Each structure stands twice: as C-alpha cells, then as structure tokens.
Image (cartoon, helix red, strand yellow):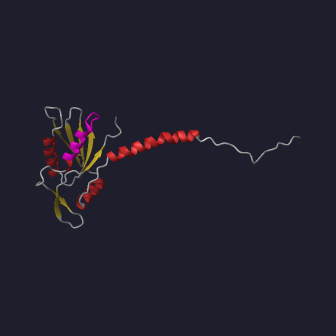
Amino acid sequence: MKKVKINHHSEFELDLASLLAVIMKLVPVLLLSSAFMQLMVIETDLPQVVTEAIQKQEKENKKNILVEVDDSRKVVITIDVEGKKSTVSVDPTKEGHVDLAKLQLTFREIKQQNPDIFKIDLAPAGNVAYNEVVRVMDEARRSRDYHIRFPIKDEKTGKDTTTDYMFPEIVFVNMMEG
C-alpha cells in the first residue's frame, strides 16, 4: 500500500477579483439610487394639527384624491370619498401648459368640500416636464391667497382651528411605470 502524504501547511491563493468586480458595479448603482430618492422627498414643517390629520387619514384610508396629468397637460382630479367617486377636470391653456390659475381654484373648491383630506396621489404622464409637475404640487399644497384658510379640528384639544395648507402630503402613485 502506498501512503498518501498530505501537506497540511500548504498555502493557496484566494481570487477576489470577481467579488471586487461585482462590488465596483454595485457601488455606482447604490449611489445613484440614493441621490434619486432624495429628489423625491420635499421636507416641510407642518403644524402638529395637520400632521395628525394626515396620520388619521392614512389610518382610515376611506378618502382619496387622485390627480392625473396627461400628455396634453389636462389635469383630471378624481375624488373618492367612501366609495363615491366624482371627477373634475382642468383643461390646458391655449399654449399647451397646465392652467395653474384654474387648478388652484379647483383645489380650493375640493378642499372646502373635503376639509379633512390633506393627502393627494399624483400620477403625471411620463412626458410631463419636471417643472410642470412641481408647479402642480405647489398649487396643491397651499392657497395662493393667504387670506383663505381652511378649518381643521385639533383632536387633542377638541378645538376648531384653521390652516392655510390644502394638500401638503403628495405621493407619486405611478413611479414604476416607464
């Protein structure tokens, strides 16, 4: 019989080239995705009453407003209150842009009819310019007229108060579409 001699003290090389290649490809992807996510969050200091109303609306989930901006810059607003849907549309200007003045008035009317809704879902078409989407968001957040205020009930104190915010919480609902 032959004895097989095994050298337990031998050295071997660990090839980490493939692991480093994967890491080098993942780092830029992670950096780009984190920078992209920062663009999607606009921090605002909201009054405590408004923040509590937003949290209450998210828990109940019975009322929803969907704002869609299509390719022709027509804005279609769908209001869903406990299963009852109604639709309002704002036609674009003659130049083909979103009619911000009419949109502001429409948002005010919707807010006056639904004072306890502070969150809207926004679904712009893929070719709507970024600056137009931001303008629509600005029109939804606050009233242009600083004298117009909207009633809100403070749940902690039980007192009625007012705020100049209409829809400060805006969520994009079509992010995974092209």
Q: Is residue 126 magenta-colored?
A: yes
- Secondary structure mostly seen in magenta is helix
Q: Nearer the viewer, residue 117 or 63?
A: 117
Q: For the point 51% across and 42% down, which residue is it?
A: 23
Image quadrant containing the N terminus: top right
Q: Quadrant of the C terminus?
A: top left
| In the depicted structure, whether residue 158 falls above or below residue 149 | below
Q: Residue furthest left?
A: 147
Determine whether, in the image, residue 124 is placed left or right of residue 31: left
52 inside magenta stretch: no
> Residue 82: where, in percent of width, then height?
24, 49
Residue 123 sits in which quadrant?
Answer: top left
Nearer to the camera, 58 or 40:
40
Viewer-proximal residue among 78 and 47: 47
Q: Where in the figure is residue 116, as x and y percent of width and height?
A: 21, 55
Q: Which residues are magenta?
A: 124-139
Residue at 42% x, 44% y is 31
Return the x and y of residue 158 as percentages of the image width and height.
Answer: 20, 66
Q: Residue at x 31, y 49 (%)?
A: 41
Left or right of 78? Residue 149 is left
Image coords of residue 121 (percent x, y): 27, 45
